Amino acid sequence: MKTQGQVLVINCGSSSVKFAIIIAETGTTIAEGIAERLFSSAAVFKPALGQHNEQKRQLQGNAAHSEAMQAIVQFIREQGLGDKLVAVGHRVVHGGEAFAESVRIDEAVLAAIAAHSHLAPLHNPANLKGIEAAMEAFPELPHIAVFDTAFHQSMPEQAFLYALPYELYSQHGIRRYGFHGSSHRYVSAEAAKILGKPLEDCNVISVHLGNGCSLCAVKNGKSVDTSMGLTPLEGLVMGTRCGDLDPSLSLHLEQQLGYSAQQVNDLYNKDSGLLGLSGISNDCRSLEKAAGEGNRRAQLALEIFCYRLAKYIAGYMVATHPLDALVLTGGIGENSTYIRETLLGLLLPLGYEVDPAANSQYRFGAAGSISTKDSRKVLVIPTNEEWVIAADAARLAQG
Ligand code: ADP
């Protein structure tokens, strides 16, 4: 299969558009940038060539996705990069049950992405805007959609069904879908290479800890369980999201405390997690600093973060037995020696032990094992979702 060429990768959020030009074979980034604070007077475009030369270009006030895309196209043309592109790869958050893998975008695919907007109201409409603007800008190129949910379509019913009346699933699609699929797929494939085993013989627990956090039980190379659910709110404690709760709490907040449905939604998604617990920040680095200075609520936030995660990992050892490795990724997983040491301390009864020297060594982009030789294996592997998107796009563009 030919995966050659340079691919424009687009990741379109509700108020930002990120882009990268990636060499599909190697994952090398040639250019990247972000147009952010769209729909405000501070709208700005920051492109960069490789890791260097970041520029700042003001966008017109209230610039929308289409203006952001025009700025991206102009930058690409100025740099003479447009002619070398073989495809445009788009990150799409929700593909529901319609997409178990990446797909070349046509009218039917656009309609299917729109049809899943009710499951990801903040993301899918923004993703569609990005696709439409990019198709207008690059009509001659194939456009490929890569879904966050696709990797988890291999989950069995016992993992994806909620214990609700079955009709809610069969008639309304209410089930666990899972997200961060490109990241879990990438790091589990990288883990197989490090372990020296074919991916289809590998059982790993992939843990993505960024602003959003999720873990995935990967058995024989396929997702068999994951912690995010119908939406990316379920599961672990995250930067601003609460993760698992008693579902009755929503009713309590509305009926006893007078919250509106929108306020409940904002509370769970924007004001909770590390930020809500600490009252300081959603950023792990800031909390580690405050905890080190003796701030009790920062310490508590990090303790709860690690405890919830350890319990999930213990549970996922059931789904992945016999486990080859625990894999840590995302900004926190790749860098935080503190979280990794605390986590593995909690997992000591299950046979995990951190190697302090290796824990200090494997940070800032370095991949390797941070467990002792007698411990169950723990790997740190930097994720690369853009490369997954670029490689899929280049491969499907040939078809
Ligand atoms: P996103 O989900 O937005 O892509 P990232 O994967 O970049 O986020 O992860 C962001 C998180 O990683 C933040 O909580 C940040 O504090 C944390 N992080 C980044 N570098 C470090 C570090 N050196 N030590 C501890 N935490 C870090």
Image (cartoon, rainbow, N blue to C red):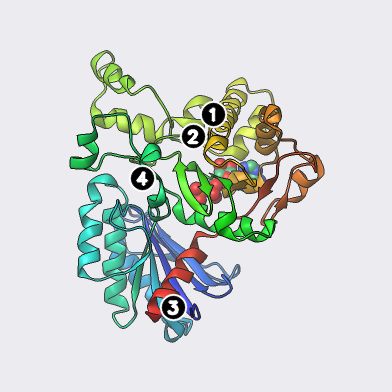
Alpha-carbon span between mark 2 and mark 1: 6 Å
Alpha-carbon span between mark 4 and mark 3: 35 Å
Three-letter amino acid code at the position of disc 2: Leu
Alpha-carbon span between mark 1 and mark 4: 20 Å
Q: Which residue is mark 1?
A: 308
Alpha-carbon span between mark 1 and mark 3: 44 Å
Alpha-carbon span between mark 2 and mark 3: 38 Å
Three-letter amino acid code at the position of disc 3: Ile
Three-letter amino acid code at the position of disc 1: Arg
Q: Is residue 302 above or below residue 73?
A: above
Q: Is residue 56 visible?
A: no
The reply to whether discs 1 and 3 touch (Cβ–Cβ < 8 Å) is no
Q: Residue at x 51, y 31 (%)?
A: 274
Q: Residue at x 24, y 34 (%)?
A: 166
Q: Which residue is mark 3?
A: 76
Marks 2 and 3: which is nearer the front? 2
Three-letter amino acid code at the position of disc 4: Tyr
Q: Is residue 210 above or below residue 397?
A: above
Alpha-carbon span between mark 2 and mark 4: 15 Å
Q: Which residue is mark 4?
A: 177
Is ligand 1 within 8 Å of the beta carbon of the residue shown at mark 3? Answer: no
Q: Secondary structure at mark 4?
A: loop
Q: Secondary structure at mark 1?
A: helix
Marks 2 and 4: which is nearer the front? 4
Mark 1 and mark 4 lie on one chain; the one further toward the N terminus is 4
4 vs 294, left or right, is left
- Residue 236 numbered mark, or none: 2
Marks 1 and 3: which is nearer the front? 1
